[in-house]
Amino acid sequence: MTLMRKGIHPAYRPVVFRDASAGFQMLTRSTATSEKAVEWEDGRTYPVVDVDVSSASHPFYTGRGRVLDTAGRVERFNRRYGKA
């Protein structure tokens, strides 16, 4: 059985990650540290880490991403280098 060495690992504790642009917060466990704190729904106070992008604001997850004109690019490639 392998045991972790004592005193060399950062504290693993509950932390709130907050995406202010989307108004989204998530309570999870992490080793991230922060001087700021927030009161969670359970009445306890947890450290809060502000993030720029989360699943609530990222275009891939929200469906607001731009679609590239891949068909136009393929047609242009075929015109230039396609079979004669």
Image (cartoon, rainbow, N blue to C red):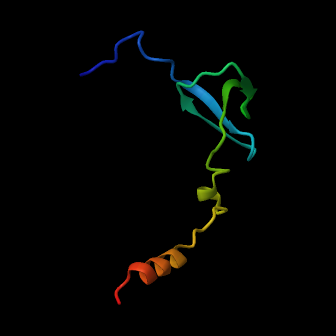
Q: Between residues 82 and 57, which one lies in front from this camera angle? A: 82
Write the residue at 69% across / 37% down.
18
Q: On the picture, is 21 further left or further right than 56?
A: right
Seen in the picture, residue 34 relative to 26 is either above or below; the reply is above
The image shows residue 66, relative to residue 41, as above or below, that is below
44 or 23, nearer to the observer:
23
Considering the image in quadrants, where does the N terminus appear?
A: top left
Position of residue 26 in the picture relative to residue 78 (left or right): right
Residue positioned 43% across, 17% down in the render: 9
Residue 14 in picture, x, y percent from top left: 59, 27
The part of the image, by quadrant, that contains residue 82 is bottom left
Tell me the quarter of the image containing the C terminus: bottom left
The image quadrant that residue 46 belongs to is: top right
Residue visible at 61% across and 49% down in the picture: 55
Where does residue 66 sit, x and y in percent of width and height?
Answer: 63, 64
Q: Which of 84 and 53 lies nearest the eye of the viewer?
A: 84
Which residue: 61% across, 28% down?
A: 15
Given the current orientation, which residue lies at the most extreme left position? 1
User: Is 45 left or right of 3, judged from the image as shown?
Assistant: right
